[in-house]
Amino acid sequence: MEAGGSSPPPDPSCGLCLAKKAPYTCPRCHLRFCSVPCYREHGSCAQDFHRRELQIRLQGQQEDPASQRRLREALLRLQELPEPGDADLQLGLDPDFEQAESEALWEQLSPDQRKRFQRLLNSGEISALLPPWKPWWTGRGRGAALIQELGGAPAGPETLHTPLQQPQPSQGTEALQQPLEEISASAQSPAEASTPVPPVPAAIPPLSSLTRSPVSPLVRFQVPNVLYAYAYSLALYHGEAEEAQLLPEFCEAVLDVSGALGAKQGFKSTAEALQAALQAIAMGRYPECLLGNAGVMAAVAQILMGECQARQKGYSLAALAHLSRLLSKGKRRAPAGDQARLYAAKKKCDFFLSWVNDNEGALTLLALEVQREYKAHLDAIKEVGAVTQELEKMWGGKVPPPKKTLIEELD
């Protein structure tokens, strides 16, 4: 057969309905199709391809290190979130949207919708689309009761073990200005129960087996600093620090916020330990977590108070043990240059774990001191808010007016 006499091969027909014109091609098996419906009815071949493409794209999304499950929940809620002036906005998704694979949701969004989703990520508004996170140290213990405000009559053990109300950042500054004695009116329902308490090791070595030297009395002030970094970082990542994508960032945040773990820093008081954590957050330009700065202080107090007086050290042991396990997992995933730092922080957590186990009686005073700093922090916020309101009233707005020219040169 001569090459010059051969005729071009006919265009392939649709691989599903056998239509003559088939302009579409499956990106995986290269089968031709006449229309989008035929392509979608092709089966799992195309779905597997899109699933892989979405996984690669998600791995490159540094602005959104959340899991695919959280992405799916956020996209589902995005459909019900209108923007000003677009009440009739339709996402343009197929009728079988809810039955679609979670990995294919991103492919069904138009470029404009993807930009809108990215704006939500960059602004932090995406957190409003996620289900609320319930810290494991809340919703347990005794029910609602009044907390005696510091500065009044002396607080007894029964006062310490009444849950503090953690202000919610979404409620604004007014929520942070609530009196300390205000707490939740009712306990959490079973449907709103918080996550399980992290397990505590069955055997915790005594301090005497870890060091031969006398333990410094200043060790007690390092514990609130470590617990603040733990509660802040856990809330910052929505309680999902166990996820492989988030674990390195969680460990980095803990070591940045806790000078006791990441910078070999020592503290001489509880106030100094908490203020150092707040300063580290500001210096590191970390965002405010779901609990807010005051809410994290309340969380530290609740962890130190424990579930009840009989098991006061239980929450502190659970928090330190949880943090030790996370740092150990993070070390295995970290680059070689960071492994020594994470290992040292993990060993410090183990030391604090033994200290808490041997010094349960010191936790009561620590909890009182954290509560005192909590109230002082709220008072400071209230004072700043009052001064800000006065300035805005004097300025006639949120920014000062432009300065008037004192000397003007005449021509």
Image: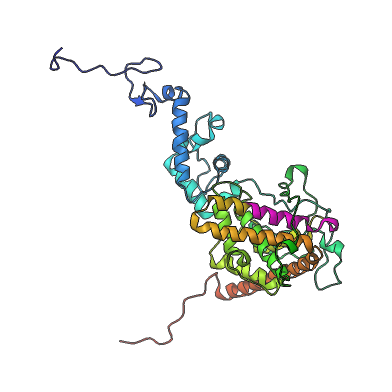
Relative height, residue 162 to residue 38 (above, below): below
Q: Does 265 lie within the magenta span? A: no
Q: Residue 338: where, in percent of width, then height?
A: 52, 58
Number of marks in the image? 0
> For the point 82% across and 53% down, which residue is it?
141
Relative height, residue 397 to residue 131 (above, below): below
State the residue in front, 391 or 356: 356
Can residue 300 be seen here? The reply is yes
Relative height, residue 77 to residue 360 (above, below): above
The quadrant of the rendering that contains the N terminus is: top left
State the residue in front, 204 or 169: 204
The quadrant of the rendering that contains the C terminus is: bottom left
Q: Tell me if 347 is positioned left or right of 79 in this view.
A: right
Main structural element of the magenta stretch: helix, strand or loop? helix
> For the point 40% across and 15% down, which residue is it?
17
Q: Does 316 lie within the magenta span? A: yes
State the residue in front, 309 or 193: 309
Relative height, residue 95 to residue 300 (above, below): above
Please give the range of residues in magenta: 308-325
